[in-house]
Image (cartoon, grey):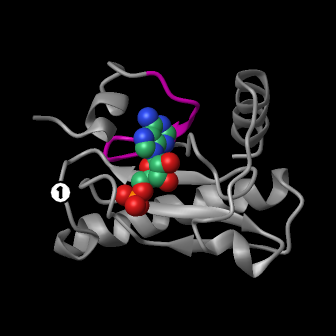
Amino acid sequence: MSSIFTKIINGEIPCYKIAEDDNFFAFLDINPNAKGHTLCVPKKEIDKLFDLDDSAYIGLMQFAKKIAIALEKTVPCQRIGMAVIGLEVPHAHVHLIPLNEMREMTFKHKVSLTPEEFETLSKEIRANL
Ligand code: AMP
């Protein structure tokens, strides 16, 4: 069965999309640690990040870098943190999290946004790409 991220990439499940290219896809995390929390995902469904071949791994990091730069321009923060977890969704991805406090990296600190706020935020980030 396809992962929830493959369903998002294929447009079967909605998301607040940030960017995509031939190999990678970025969208806002629906349960964000902080405003602007974004997931960057390879389109090829592989569970663990470190099982990606070198080209996909480096490509994902290059893609994530572009998104992180746009995020930092958009969301007031001290810097963008990156995390790899994967305990919930077995489809490799990196979390990009605009940080002002250490607890925003804990995955226990959550913020809630309305659908309108998610939509506006995704537009603002896309405009800074
Ligand atoms: P993990 O696999 O532990 O790295 O966490 C998966 C992340 O995916 C969590 O932060 C979830 O909030 C996020 N997530 C799960 N389902 C969706 C979805 N449909 N849209 C956006 N983010 C999601």
In the image, farthest residue toward the right: 76
**Residue 36: x, y in percent?**
71, 50
Q: Amino acid at mark 1?
A: Ile
Which portion, as a residue range, is magenta?
Answer: 14-26
Mark 1, residue position: 46
Give me the residue at 73% from left, 41% from top.
112
**Residue 17: x, y in percent?**
55, 33
Q: Is residue 24 magenta?
A: yes
Give me the residue at 32% from left, 64% from top.
87
Rendered view: 21 above or below 89 = above
Give me the residue at 38% from left, 22% from top.
13
Element type where label 1 sits in the image: loop
- 79 or 34: which is nearer to us? 34
Q: How many marks?
A: 1
Judged left or right of residue 123, residue 89 is left
Determine the image quadrant of residue 52.
bottom left
